[in-house]
Image: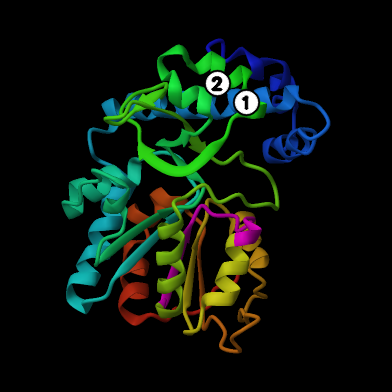
Amino acid sequence: MQQFRECMEIVPWLRKRGVSVEGELGRLQAQKESFPRVHQELAAIRYYLHVALWSCQLAWGERHRGITNHAVLLREIERWRYASSESVCFVTFNYDTMLEDAMRQVLGIEIRGLNSYLQEQYSLVKLHGSINWGREVSNGSVISAPHTYNQQRLIQEAATLQISDRYVLAARRPMLREGDAQRVVFPALSIPVERKDEFNCPSDHVQRLKELLPKVTRIITIGWRATEKDFIDLLQKQLTEKPSLMVVSGDANGAKETVSNLGIELPGKLRTNSNPQPMTATLLVQSGFTGLVTEEIDRLEEFLRSGLALVRQA
């Protein structure tokens, strides 16, 4: 936090007992039109998330040495995909790159550029951005003299920055100048807020998602509360099949929240605006991601191969 001090005065709000961090950040974001300082605070938060999560992930990598839930999940999905000749789309709202690491380890997919996320058999869509994504800053003063800028100056001038929709992979933290042209870049991370959504993702990635959703036959959610309004709206508009649903959560309340936010009543069905066909089944796994890959792997296999699961009340 001391690297990006403009966010420090709001930290006490986020540390209050029982507080919703997303709710507090939403309240802060609503103030930016009337209080210019908020632009600097939000910019500092983005840099903080970018650096802190990158550092935490590196430290965690030294501990797990490639033995991760992500790798187990991808192995089972690939085993199913190989036999069925299906294609897979991962959608994540997390900023870390643990899924990309597992794709390289298990599937041999190397992410060398933004186009690498969209493969024929596998697509990865990170709707809220990534710790290693930057968006080029297009202010004339920045383009003409990029070497006069550092992270602190970008934060100070956040209210007037022109952030383009040109995304690049960042090789270092904290990111600043990337690519052969040494363009100045700004962290591509959505501020997490409640009940709102802010896609921070290349447009062709979103377009691929829209093209794939009508073909979806199975949906697995892991640790997802289903609070992203824009994405839920997208699901309602684009789903045309009758996908089976598997909800993985750490406890019964989390599982029920996801199902409720999706508009499903247990036992029940999700009907979309444009499509009268419902989700056909709901399987709740309440032992979390680790429980799924260590204790419930047979349920995952059954779900993938049958495409249908019995409803189990929490």
Type of amino acid under label 1: Ala
Task: Say what secondary structure mark 1 lies in.
Answer: helix
Compared to 180, does 192 lie above or below? below
**Residue 312 percent across, percent down from the top left:** 54, 73
Disc 1 vs disc 2: Cβ atoms closer than 8 Å?
A: yes
The quarter of the image holding the C terminus is bottom right
**Identity of the residue drawn at 63% across and 82% down:** 271
Q: Kindly identify which numbered label has been placed on residue 158.
A: 1
Q: Position of residue 253 (x, y in %)?
A: 64, 56
Q: Between 265 and 119, which is closer to the camera in this rendering? A: 119
- Mark 2, Cα crowd under 10 Å, few <14 / some 14-19 / many 20+, is many
The magenta stretch spans residue 223: yes
Q: Give the residue at the far bottom of this rendering.
A: 276
Q: What element carries label 2?
A: helix
Which of the 4 image quarters holds residue 232?
bottom right
Q: Residue 185 in the image: x percent, y percent?
A: 44, 30
Above-or-below relation of 30 to 45:
below
Q: Which mark is residue 171?
A: none
- In the image as oriented, which residue stretches furthest toward the right? 34
How many numbered circles are shown?
2
- Residue that numbered label 2 is attached to: 154
Question: Marks 1 and 2, how far apart in space?
Answer: 6 Å
User: Which residue is nearer to you in this view: 207 or 49?
Assistant: 207
The residue shown at (45%, 73%) is: 213
Please identify the quarter of the rendering in which residue 182 is found.
top left
For disc 1, the neighbor class at 10 Å (few under 14, some 14 to 19, many from 20) is: many
**Residue type at the position of mark 2:** Leu
Q: Which residue is drawn at 57% across and 53% down?
A: 251
Q: Give the range drawn in magenta.
A: 216-230
